[in-house]
Image: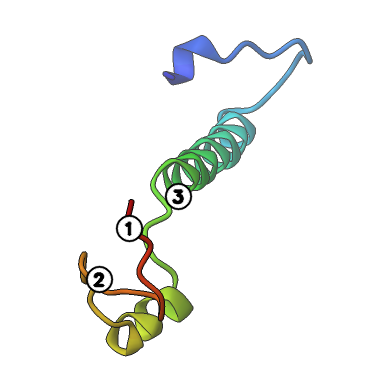
Amino acid sequence: MKIEDVRFITRGVTPEEKAAVWAVLDAQINEESVIEHAVQSPGMNSWAKSQISIREDMVEDRGFGREFTA
C-alpha cells in the first residue's frame, strides 16, 4: 500500500494529519501481518517443548502384555 492509494473524503486535511493516518494504517497492516504469520506457522509452544524430554522412543516390536498371533 502506498500513501497515494489512500484517499481522503474529508476536505482540508493537512499533510501532518495525512501522515498520522498513514502511520496508523501502516502499523495496523504490520500488526495483522504478524498475526497472520503466527497463525499459519504456530510452531511448538513452551509446554510442548518441555514435554519432549520425558517421552520414550517408539519401539515397533513392543508388546502390550499379551501377544495375539494367528
Q: How many labels does the image show?
A: 3
Residue denoted by label 2: 58
Residue denoted by label 1: 69
Q: Quadrant of residue 14?
A: top right
Is 52 positioned to the left or the right of 45 in the image?
A: left
Q: Is label 2 in a helix, a strand or a loop?
A: loop
- In front: label 1 or label 2: 1
Residue located at (50% from left, 11% from top) = 5
As displayed, is residue 46 above or below residue 53? above
Give the position of the N terminus as an image quadrant.
Answer: top left
As displayed, is residue 18 above or below residue 1? below
Distance CA(mark 2)–CA(mark 3): 30 Å
Residue denoted by label 3: 38
Residue 22 coordinates in the image, percent (x, y): 54, 32
How would you rate the neighbour count of disc 1 (Cα within 10 Å): few for under 14, some for 14-19, many for 20 or more?
few
As displayed, is residue 14 above or below residue 23? above
The residue sitting at the right extreme is 10
Amino acid tagged 3: Ala
The residue sitting at the front extreme is 70
Is 8 positioned to the left or the right of 28 in the image?
A: right
Distance CA(mark 1)–CA(mark 2): 21 Å
As displayed, is residue 37 above or below residue 21? below
Q: Looking at the image, is mark 1 or mark 3 earlier in the sequence?
A: 3
